[in-house]
Amino acid sequence: MILCLLLLLSGCGKPQIQTVTKTEYIYMTPPAAWLVKRHPLEFDGETNSDLLHYAIDLLEIIEKHNQDKDMIQLWQEEVK
């Protein structure tokens, strides 16, 4: 009988192993420099030459805007 009690008590002394899972969410955002808004230039010229320079300036702004989008796409690929 003592042997049976010893066998029963030996099962109580073992530590129980529990698995704990923790989910952590990390929200990644693009760098702030890529999210700066560009304001369109106001046209204040009077001649066709002024209009041409204004159009060239607008094209440069569009190119920079597209570069920002390309940089965001590259960043997204790096994060994945």
Image (cartoon, rainbow, N blue to C red):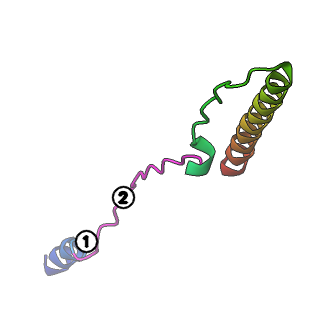
For the question of whether residue 71 can be seen, the reply is: yes
Of 34 and 45, the residue lying toward us: 45
Residue 4 in magenta stretch: no
**Helix, strand or loop at mark 2:** loop
Residue type beneath disc 1 = Gly
* Helix, strand or loop for the magenta stretch, by majority: loop
Q: Return the residue at label 1.
A: 11
Q: Position of residue 11 (x, y in %)?
A: 25, 71
**Which amino acid lies under the numbered mark 2 shown in the image of this protein?**
Val
Q: Earlier in the sequence, mark 1 or mark 2?
A: 1
Which SS class for mark 1?
Answer: loop
Residue on which disc 2 sits: 20
Check the image and report above or below for 7 versus 40: below
Compared to residue 5, the image places residue 62 above or below, namely above
Q: Nearer the viewer, residue 21 or 14?
A: 21
Drawn side of residue 53 relative to residue 25, left or right? right
Task: Name the front one of labels 1 and 2.
Answer: 2
Residue drawn at x 75%, y 39% is 64
**Quadrant of residue 51 within the rendered picture:** top right
**Residue 34 place in picture, x, y as percent:** 63, 45
Question: Label 1 vs label 2: CA separation?
Answer: 23 Å
Q: Quadrant of residue 48 in the image?
A: top right
Q: Which residues are magenta?
A: 13-31
Query: In this orientation, which residue lies closer to the viewer: 13 or 51?
Result: 51
Contact between marks 1 and 2 (CB within 8 A): the answer is no
* Label 2 Cα crowd, 10 Å radius (few <14 / some 14-19 / many 20+): few
Q: Residues within 10 Å of mark 1 (few under 14, many from 20)?
A: few
Residue at image location 80% in from the left, 26% down from the top: 50
